[in-house]
Image (tube, grey):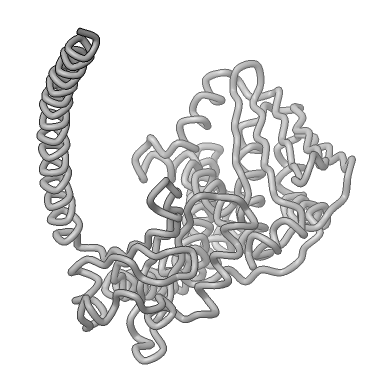
Amino acid sequence: MDQDLSFEKIQNRLTRTQEQILVYSRDFARIYRKEKEQRAHAEEMHQKLLAVVNSMSEGMVATDKNMIIQEVNSSFVNMFKTRQQECLGTSLRQFVPAEKLTRYLMLKNQIQHPSMDFEFSPVDKKETVYWVFVSDLSATDTIEGGFVFLFRDVTDSKGFERLKSQFIKFASQEICVPLNGLLGLTEQFYENVRTKLSKEELSYFNFLKKSGRSLQSLIEDMIQISPLHSGEKLNKTLVKLDNLMVDVLRKLEDEIHNQEIQIQFEVQDSGSIFIDQDLLGRALFNMQKILSTYTLVDGTITIEMFQSGKGLYLRFTCPDIVPNDRKELQKMVNSQFSLRERMEDFGIGLALAKEIIEWNGGKFKIETEKELVIELAFPSWSESLRISA
């Protein structure tokens, strides 16, 4: 009897086991079908993304941390006249100069930024210029991480920019020569006949001279700034910012005296910055001239120079500019006026001053709520040298 019960128990256990196996098989089949569907969907998305990447006009390269190429798109293959199989598993340094690639990656790590861009010309094709954007590739459970590079051939655009810059420079110089002669004759004629002119006629002459000088200043700005748009490098040197500001104020001394305003220059911290001295001096000159023009008679402008953290600051405080003029200056900085309107109100000088300051690695900030305050921030010489490395 005990043996029969034992046999029945065994049969029951076998039956339950078979039922459990059947349930597990059904669950496994369901999971397998779901996994298979997900893999098919992932493969479809991969093919779509691959088609998008291959349709990009920019060349794309994915590398590991050692610059070994893992993936490339067709644009990169066509750009460098190679084949995909020849690229995979090789070093990116075969296509980008190793020194430049190492230098910019070190710089990216130093400033702790996830991406950056640079330009280079291949050793065998000096006339070709490529723009490169590099970004970090985050590590996952299946990927160790690395970099993604985008390449764009900017040879034609660079050539066009150089051609445009040369035309602007040539045209400006051709205008400047006869304009200087015209202004000189106007000044001489004015000195000879000013005692014989009425007040109204004198005002016309003054307007003519002022307009001529403004046009002359604008042309000089164009001559000086146009090469920068063609990608030419700034002529950076180490400059003491307080000495540069003093030179600017000396050049403006006569005009400031005629306008009957006072300028106070307070140096709390002296320091040096790594900038293009001539270009930044021109920007500060234009900006100070505009602020002086909009300041009321007997008004004051306070310029403070101080250091904060790793930056060197210039703060221009102008309490004697009326609210409407403060708004106009704000609009001029944002370049919301047409070129003709900004020329008439000196606004193009302020807009260009902002651009020059930013070209030199500085930051331009303007506040107009209670009084006009313009703050310029430049990295100290050690920081600017590191960033410009």
Q: Is 57 rendered above or below residue 269?
A: below
Q: Is 195 rendered above or below residue 325?
A: below
Is 335 positioned to the left or the right of 59 in the image? right
Image quadrant containing the N terminus? top left
Is 125 positioned to the left or the right of 33 in the image? right
Can you give x and y, in whole percent of width and height, for residue 277 in the image? 69, 64
Can you give x and y, in whole percent of width and height, for residue 127 in the image? 34, 85
| Residue lying at the far bottom of the rendered structure | 124
Can you give x and y, in whole percent of width and height, for residue 53 in the image? 20, 57
Q: Which residue is at a point 43% across and 59% down the rendered structure image?
A: 147
Q: Nearer the viewer, residue 360 or 350?
A: 360
Image quadrant containing the C terminus? bottom right
Q: Is 179 rendered above or below residue 9?
A: below
Q: Which residue is at a point 29% across and 78% down the rendered structure image?
A: 87
Choose top left, top right, bottom left or bottom right for residue 316.
top right
Can you give x and y, in whole percent of width and height, for residue 18 in the image? 13, 23
Choose top left, top right, bottom left or bottom right for residue 336.
top left
Q: Is residue 201 visible?
A: no
Q: Is residue 118 visible?
A: yes
Is 176 positioned to the left or the right of 293 in the image? left
Q: Is 113 rendered above or below residue 72?
A: above
Q: Which residue is at a point 20% across and 80% down the rendered structure image?
A: 83
Q: Nearer the viewer, residue 74 or 125?
A: 74
